[in-house]
Amino acid sequence: MIKHPEISACCATCEWSSQIENNDELVFCHKKKRERQAVSHCRRYVFDLLKYTPAKPKQITNLDMTMIEI
């Protein structure tokens, strides 16, 4: 398993899971052969980089010189 503070272990990003049609809350675990909650995880969790959706980058605010009063 990849240990990274931004990546949380959940069945939605597991290598053994596949998305169930018309349902975002459940995934099918091919290792355990049953449906599971997308936010749960088990000991057989293996991170799949292709299923990871990175967070949106923080927008950098640009200062306008008219906003600054000296």
Image: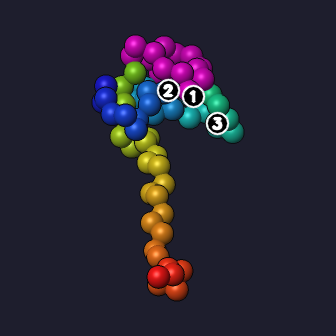
Q: Specify the label residue 11 is tagged with.
A: 2
Where does the magenta region start and end? 29-44
Position of residue 11 relative to residue 21, above or below, is above
Viewer-nearest residue: 35 or 7? 7
Around disc 2, counting alpha carbons within 10 Å, would you say few (fewer than 14), some (14 to 19), or many (20 or more)?
Answer: many
Three-letter code for the amino acid on which mark 3 is drawn: Asp
Q: CA distance from mark 2 to mark 1?
A: 5 Å
Q: Residue 37, image x and y in percent?
A: 60, 23
Residue at 54% over, 21% down: 40
Closer-to-camera residue (15/37): 37
In terms of secondary structure, where does tag 1 sit?
Answer: loop
Q: In the rendered structure, which amino acid carries the disc numbered 1?
A: Ala
Residue 49 position (above or below residue 66): above
- Give the numbered dot on residue 38: 1
Q: Position of residue 47 (x, y in %)?
A: 36, 31
The residue under the point 39% across, 16% down is 44
